Image (cartoon, helix red, strand yellow):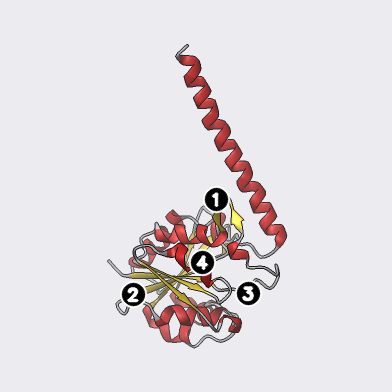
């Protein structure tokens, strides 16, 4: 089995929202915690959580086996600095690095595992999920792209690397919109909060209904 290291980028500046969006509550967890839990439950061998100075107080939330938590003091320099910080502490024996965004709370573990399984087949060095024709994240890069990832500058991820190596890209259609759904604005957050609250209410109603039927059955 190939060794997969996941880097969760949680040091963004949240310029559009004006607050640390990753610390906002979404159900019983924060936005970032939802992303983290999906990765921890996955088949990734390690999860590296990169935090910024503003949210370094969250480090205590991520004390679990196979997890490393680091602070990026240069997060104002953009996403590339967080990728670089994660790569600085990556396991030396990694074969692929999965780069995930901290503002995608609807990412599913089964989707992550599906991407890992495609990577393990070894036919392509860059694995990109696709939902209804839209490319998304997380993306897995083979270790041969480590230098190119380290050389990234500014507020960019690995898109330029993907564009430079189209022959090595494998697009993987997935059924979950979590790979393309993120939270960038207050409206995004309010919409997702409403959806999640509605799902929780429906779940409680179903559970209450089962309980009531059970009680009636014993009368």
**Mark closer to the chain start, 4 or 3:** 3
Residue 95's disc is 2
Question: Residue at the location (50% across, 25% down)?
Answer: 211
Q: Secondary structure at mark 2?
A: loop
Q: CA distance from mark 2 to mark 4?
A: 29 Å
Q: Mark 3 or mark 2: which comes first in sequence?
A: 3
Residue located beneath label 1 in the image: 28
Looking at marks 1 and 4 on the same chain, the residue that comes earlier in the sequence is marked by: 1
Label 4 to label 3: alpha-carbon separation: 15 Å
Residue 170: where, in percent of width, then height? 45, 68
Q: CA distance from mark 3 to mark 1?
A: 23 Å
Taking 64 as reference, is 192 left or right? right
Q: Which mark is residue 58?
A: 4
Q: Are marks 3 and 1 in contact (CB under 8 Å)?
A: no
From the viewer's perspective, is residue 216 above or below residue 26? above
Q: Earlier along the polypeptide chain: callout 3 or callout 1? A: 3
Position of residue 124 measured from the top left corner of the image (x, y, whole percent): 40, 72
């Amino acid at each position: 089995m190939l060794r997969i290291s996941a880097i969760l980028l949680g040091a963004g500046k949240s310029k559009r929202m004006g607050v640390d969006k990753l610390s906002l509550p979404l159900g019983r967890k924060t936005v970032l915690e939802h992303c983290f839990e999906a990765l921890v439950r996955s088949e990734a061998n390690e999860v590296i959580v990169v935090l910024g100075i503003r949210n370094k107080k969250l480090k205590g939330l991520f004390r679990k086996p196979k997890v490393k938590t680091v602070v990026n003091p240069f997060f104002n320099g953009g996403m590339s600095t967080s990728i670089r910080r994660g790569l600085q502490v990556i396991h030396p024996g990694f074969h692929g690095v999965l780069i995930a965004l901290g503002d995608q709370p609807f990412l599913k573990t089964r989707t992550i595992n599906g991407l890992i399984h495609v990577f393990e087949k070894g036919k392509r060095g860059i694995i990109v999920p696709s939902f209804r024709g839209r490319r998304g994240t997380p993306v897995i890069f083979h270790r041969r792209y480590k230098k190119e990832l380290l050389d990234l500058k500014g507020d960019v991820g690995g898109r330029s690397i993907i564009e430079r190596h189209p022959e090595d890209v494998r697009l993987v259609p997935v059924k979950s919109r979590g790979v393309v759904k993120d939270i960038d604005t207050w409206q995004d957050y309010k919409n997702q909060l409403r959806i999640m609250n509605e799902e929780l209410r429906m779940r409680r109603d179903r559970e209450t209904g089962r309980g009531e039927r059970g009680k009636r059955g014993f009368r």
